[in-house]
Amino acid sequence: MQYEAVIGLEIHAQLLTESKMFCGCPTKFGAEPNTQTCPVCVGLPGVLPVINKRAIEYVVKTGLALNCEITQYSRFARKNYFYPDLPKGYQISQYELPLCRGGYLEIALNGRRKKIRLTRIHLEEDAGKNIHEGGDYSLVDLNRAGVPLMEIVTEPDIRSAQEAAEFMRRLRMILRYLGVCDGNMEQGSLRCDANVSVRPAGQEGFGVKTEIKNMNSFKFIEKALEYEINRQIRLLSKGEKIVQETRLWDAKRGITESMRSKEEAHDYRYFPEPDLMPVEIDEGWLNEIRAQIVELPDARMERFIKEYNLPEDDARLLTEERAMADWFEEAVRLGGHPKTVANWMMGELLRLLNKDGIQIEDSKVKPAQLVGLLSLIDRDVISGKIAKTVFEEMYQTGREAEVIVKEKGLLQITDTEEIERIVEDILNNNPKEVERFRAGEQKLLGFFVGQVMKATKGKANPRIVNELLRKKLSA
Ligand SMILES: [Zn+2]
């Protein structure tokens, strides 16, 4: 029998606010354990939470970018459960009135476009972190407790592990463009759980689902879902039943493992949070937030193709990251030819950045400096070949191309007389090759060019070299 997978995702994205959701503690990653806490986020009795306005704006911004309906009157709810990383004994979340409802995200896979519908986006607080170092105890770090967390829930529209991974890639790109989440999956600021079931192809109803947790990279999402889909198909084919449960992805062993039976919503005893006022978003505020939304990757890619005449692949690559697209546009604004700038970015710049694991925003070479280098090539001050060496030096030191060229004596030789002298030397020293060339072996021209370049350490202007050689050899 043919089976079909049905997948829905629940994504948790830590918001890039300076302070936590309901108190003023900082949210920086990697601080000493329990140094970013206060009576509110460690859950001492008698304290009162205060809503972080910026967090609301980030969720609404995301909702608008993902075509959601914004709930103009929403409220927070208590989700009750006990776990050592949750000192209050409940998490402040949203239940029946989330900030955003509906919406969709379009993905493209193998040339096919598909809309994945969203159920909702709500705002909640993150829990702390349990640290198991071995021994007969565990430690709790509450720095993360109370960090604003946006939960994005999709409809069960995803049909394969590849679609799920592609959805996450697109979503991450948009969240980073909006500046609401840094998308760092390794550090856990973007996390993804999946509900997976399989059913005979063509069947309407859903099968029993399992929830997969702990997938912290695109690669693991694909692997974990593939494993789980196959596991369920195997069981059903043998006539066995799927148990509704939560399973953990074990990346080392490449399998999912049963963790606990899945809770139902009624297990959490949700009720409206009595310590917080409902959130009202009027038209004025909504418009203010709408005005902050930047041009998103798809639109920017289309514009790059139209406005700069770039091939689609170039436009796609350059718009994957907002910082990269900004870098490109700044270079073009300063006078760089679009396709030339694109080539240098996708070639030399990305190669060096990737090699060192550096983000483009931290690059020492700035757009103005690349444009400076390109202008040296255009004006025949240096050759294209020397330019690569100069660029590496610019990348290492952040200095201007012109300074490097002068200091290292890399100026291109455009003095025709000087080149002529060198050309004559080369021809005199290679009489046999000259004879063969004149007898019709045209490809020897490359040999002569190479000799001149070697003699000038690559600094001779290739156009002049070619002209002079042709002239002398046909004489
Ligand atoms: Zn706090």
Image: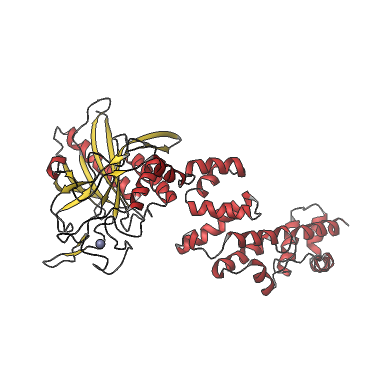
- Residue sitting at x 24%, y 44%: 94
- Residue 57: x and y in percent read 37, 48
Picture quadrant of residue 138? bottom left
Quadrant in which the N terminus is drawn: top left
Q: What quarter of the picture does the C terminus occupy?
A: bottom right
Q: Against 327, is 98 above or below? A: above
Along the horizontal axis of the image, is 345 left or right of 377? left
Q: Is residue 203 left or right of residue 457?
A: left
Give the quarter the ligand 1 occupies: bottom left
Residue 336 location, x and y as percent?
65, 54
Number of numbered tags placed on the structure image: 0
Q: Residue at x 13, y 44 (%)?
A: 269
Q: Residue furthest right?
A: 475
Q: Is residue 12 above or below residue 202?
A: below
User: Among all residues in the image, which is located at the extreme bottom?
Assistant: 407
Viewer-proximal residue among 325 and 442: 325
What colour scheme was applied to this rendering of the protein?
A: secondary structure
Where residue 377 sits in the image (x, y, percent)?
A: 69, 60
Judge whether 91 appears above or below 417 on screen.
Answer: above
Nearer-the-camera pick, 82 or 269:
269
Q: Nearer the viewer, residue 411 or 278?
A: 278
Find residue 97 and report its horizontal and vertical position in percent: 25, 39
